[in-house]
Image (spheres, rainbow, N blue to C red):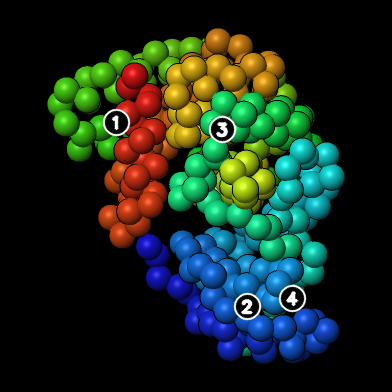
Amino acid sequence: MPAAEVSVSVGLVRRLLDEQHPDLANLPVEVLASGWDNLVCRLGPEFLVRLPRRAVAAELVAHEQQWLPQLADRLPLPVPAPVRVGRPTAQYPWSWSVVPFLPGRIATRSEPDDLWSAAATLGTFLDALHTPAPSQAPVNPFRGIPLAGRAEGVLKALAHVAPADRAAALRVWKTAVATPAWDGPPVWLHGDLHPANILVHRGRISAVIDFGDLTRGDPATDLSVAWMLFTAQQRIALRQAYGHADDATWERARGWALALSLVFLTRSADNPLMRGIGERTFRAVLE
């Protein structure tokens, strides 16, 4: 995990709240997670604070602040649209957010009780999200792009895969890259949709979180989640609920699932949770 570029702590959160949102400053604060990009703290019973720990993450938080409130109202699942925005100060250089606390556990740790229903729920969510995005929407150089743009990383990572699996994966990759590219308008994308960014509450998918990689482009990027959580038959349920993934888009989605599984496998030495997602996805792609 990359080192933090600034010192982030509960103490810093308290100071920023006291200075900028004093009506929230007396709420209890405790660290919930410290990830690659953000320190996330629970703030009382209703809120979370997301504090970037790297400059690259600060830009992603700005994207969430600008665009997620505009998308939230038309999505069929709750998303963490910011309810307060924090400003840079002398003690902290970037914008930060207060977002609603959404109950549930990540799907990696608590699978839905009914994966068939969950697949349909996620397909419906993506159908609502994947609408044409404006030209001002964020552009991500790694997500939503033509699949061929991931070739260098995929081929490099495959060199570390067992020979028998490498041959099968290479066949999947060549087939996916050879499919027609997305020729529709760039659509809104979550950009980083995997089971650790899906919440499950009382046995059902309850929310989709962490929109830092929000971008526009090929919907196949997000549809790759079908290989991260579901069986082959359950993937059909997701595709049917989504309603408009043609064969080429579905094949590219499989290619995206392969590319992302290799990222998870090769960059998660200190993160067994993400490595587990990579292993499961890789096996599903090779079915």
- Which amino acid type corresponds to the residue marked 1 in the rendered image? Leu
Tag shown at residue 215: none
Left or right of 125? Residue 2 is left
Which amino acid, mark 3? Asp
- Secondary structure at badge 1 equals helix
Q: Secondary structure at mark 4?
A: loop
- Closer to the camera, 131 or 194? 194
Q: Which mark is in front, 1 or 3? A: 3
Which circle marks residue 93 in the picture? 2
Residue appearing at x 67%, y 21% in the figure: 241
Find out whether the residues at labels 3 and 4 contact each other: C-beta distance under 8 Å: no
Location of mark 3 (residue): 114
Pointer 4: what residue?
A: 87
Please identify the quarter of the rendering in which residue 270 is found.
Answer: bottom left
On the image, the x and y values in percent for residue 50 come to 63, 68
At mark 3, the secondary structure is: loop
* Left or right relative to 198: residue 129: right
Determine the CA span between mark 1 and mark 3: 36 Å
**Residue 204 seen:** yes
How far, Cα to Cα, is label 3 from label 4? Answer: 42 Å
Q: Amino acid at mark 2?
A: Pro
The mark tally for this picture is 4
For marks 3 and 2, give the one nearer the viewer: 3
Which tag, 1 or 4, sits closer to the chain's start?
A: 4
**Residue 165 locus on image (x, y percent):** 22, 25
Q: Are marks 3 and 2 in contact (CB under 8 Å)?
A: no
Type of the residue with mark 4: Arg
Residue under circle 1?
155
Question: Nearer the N terminus, badge 3 or badge 2?
Answer: 2
